[in-house]
Each structure stands twice: as structure tokens, then as C-alpha cells.
Amino acid sequence: MADEPRRDPVEEAVAQWRAHGWEGGERLRAALSIIRVEELIRAASTEVLRPLDLSYARHELLSLLYFSSHGELPLGKLSSRLMVHPASVTTTVDSLVKLGFVERIPHPTDRRGTLARITDEGRARIAASSPQLVERRFGLDALTEEEARVVTELLRKVRVDCGDF
Amino acid sequence: MADEPRRDPVEEAVAQWRAHGWEGGERLRAALSIIRVEELIRAASTEVLRPLDLSYARHELLSLLYFSSHGELPLGKLSSRLMVHPASVTTTVDSLVKLGFVERIPHPTDRRGTLARITDEGRARIAASSPQLVERRFGLDALTEEEARVVTELLRKVRVDCGDF
DNA sequence: CCAATGTCAGGTTGACTGATATGC
DNA sequence: CGCATATCAGTCTACCTGACATTG
């Protein structure tokens, strides 16, 4: 069997798109690239986080607590800051409580509310994960700092346009 | 209540990262930007695809069939081309069969194999979705064609480095 | 016998909807 | 009272692992 050259799925998709006479190839190419690289970033992070019993979503939430001034935040605040559904916060916090990385405590003034507070073990996991994530360069080892800045700048335009913040 | 300025979650995360004396802020910033924009792209696509009963995964698979020479491919080929697990292909094809967009037919020569073939209705859905996706510019309306090219180029470096193709 | 193909069972994750109790 | 907060039940999607029957 002849050696089939290793194909780039992004370029293939764009080629076929154009072969059908459809427009917008440049943006399609960029969109598919972003989607692929997002998967690569997630894969690199997962490799670091999994041995620490952290999924991506759990790590995001736990980091937010780690960085917050008193290591605790109301669940509703977590929902808005992480831009995820309130019910998702409930289940993610559940799993973190079960792991012993977070505890639920009653809101001091609003008795409807609940705070999630990071535990010492939770802090230890974040502290352990961070140097490893740095060392992996978040999956973006191929980019120079300047190139990373260019990517950030261009994508910031997209985020502003979409009302991301 | 005073007007709280609208915050950028990406910049906040980077600021806190640095406040803890950790390295790699530029790549973190780029990685978080990519993750956010990927979500925005998916949201824009979902808005188009959902009324057509297509999830993102179903649309990917169906497009591949639509673009293939005879509208049919072996399931294993779908797995490798889409870079998803064989079992995921089975379930995604299942759902497309139930919707009437795809049919399973026996492989003509290899009796172990099965082909997925796109139906006329399946073709109609892809044909209907494409102009809408173009019109939405795949969620990347904010980028000029030149900027989209820059993004693609930089991310291609990352993909090559990670062995994406 | 070994390798490949597709399927199935079982589990995890993440997110949504709608209903509900509680308290502001 | 209306509104906000968090939870719960149930559903859905997508993906994985490991086992399996079938065939090349």
C-alpha cells in the first residue's frame, strides 16, 4: 500500500467547502483551527489534572475559590463568574465536596445562600497543579510569548464583538 | 448600587495568576481566550444547527458524508477522520439513522464492515445549514479575512507541534 | 491464530429544563 | 407579594473503557 500523506483535517474541510462553491472559507478555517487547538489545550490540561482528581470544570471552580480573598464564594457568584448554569455549579461543588476539596457553609447574612469554601487539601491540589500547567505551557509550547499576545489580541476582538464581557 | 465595571474573566484570571507569583501568564491568557472563543463559535453554530435537529457532532459526521464522493463511508473511516472513538461513531450514526439523515448499508466487499450513507433528507439539512453558517461567519464576524488568516497560521504551529496532523 | 470491524454494556462528565422549598 | 437562591429529579449529549462476535 502506498504511503498516504498525513492530512490536515482542517485544510481538507475547507477544500471541500470551497469545492461546493460556498463562501467564508477563511473564517471556517480559523474556526476549525480554534476548535482543534481548544481540544489540544484541554488534553494537555487533563493530563496534568487527572492524577489530581480534577476535571477541567472542577479545576476552574476550585481555582476561583483559591484565588478569592477568603477562599470562599457564594454559589451564585461562582455561576456568574464561571459563566455556567447554576445547576452545574451545584453538581460540580457536590463532586468537590465528595473529594474533600471544598465544603459548603451557610451564608453569614443571607440565609437562602450557601458559600463554597476551599479546604486545605483543595489548596494543595491547586498549588500542585499550577507549576505543572506552567511547565506544559498550557499546551501552547509552540507559540512564542509575542505570538501568544497576538492570538489573545485577535480573539479579544471576537469576544468583545460577541458580548463576552 | 455603584456601577460595577464589566470584567473580563480572562484578564482577571491572569491577574490573579500573576499575583501568586506564577509564570506563564502570556500562554495562560492565550489559552483561556481560545477556550472562550471556542465556546462562542459553538454557541453560534448551535443556534443555526439546533432547529435542523443537528448537534455539533452530528453535523460534523453528516458533513463528512455529504462531502465524500459517493455520500458514504465506512464507520471506521469516520472514526479516524473525525478523530473520535469508534463507539462514539456508532452512537452518533444511531441518532442520525433515527432522524432519517443516514442509513447503514453493508460493506460491499468486507463483510465485517458497515457503511454510513447520507440520505436525501440528510443532504437537504447540510445544504440548509451551510449558507446560514456562512452568514454567521462561524461566529468570527469580528475578524477580517486577513486576521482570520493570522489566527489560522499561528494555531497551525500549535497543531503541528502537538502532532495534530 | 492474530488483526481489524463494529457493537454493546456500563460509567463519567457537563449542561439543560422545570419544579420546589426557602428566605429576602 | 414578587423575586432570588439553591437544590433536586429527570433528560440529553458526547465521550470513554472493556468485552464481545464476526470476519479477513
Image: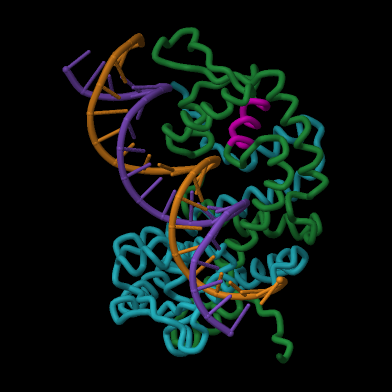
Chain colours: A green, B cyan, C orange, D purple
| Quadrant for the N terminus of chain B in the image | top left
In the rendered image of this protein, does residue A135 appear above or below residue A126? below
Task: Depth check: give the residue in front, A33 or A156.
Answer: A33
Image: C14 above or below B3: below
Q: Please give the name of the residue rendered at 71% of the width and 66% of the height, measured from the top-left corner.
A: B159
Looking at the picture, tell me which residue is in the foreground, B42 or A123: A123
The total number of labels drawn is 0
Dividing the picture into quarters, in which one does residue B24 lie? top right
> Does residue A156 appear in the picture of this structure?
no
Q: Position of residue B101 (x, y in %)?
A: 33, 73
The x, y position of residue A85, in whole percent, is: 43, 37
Who is closer to the viewer here, A136 or B98? B98
Q: Is residue D6 above or below residue C18?
A: above
Please name the residue shown 64% across and 24% down the image.
A101
Measuring 48% from the left and 12% from the top, which residue is drawn there?
Answer: A107
Indicate the position of residue B95 as horizontal and vertical percent values. 36, 63
Q: Can residue B37 be seen?
A: yes
Instruction: Give the farthest residue toward the bottom.
Output: A2
- Eyeballing the image, is B163 above or below D13? below
Q: Image quadrant for the C terminus of chain B?
A: bottom right
Magenta span: chief secondary structure:
helix
Residue D18: x and y, percent?
A: 61, 51
Drawn side of residue B145 relative to residue B13, left or right: left
Residue A43 belongs to the span the image colors magenta: no
Residue at the image point whose x is 79% and y is 61% from the top? A142
Q: Is residue A44 left or right of residue C18?
A: right
**Which region of the structure is painted magenta?**
A58-67
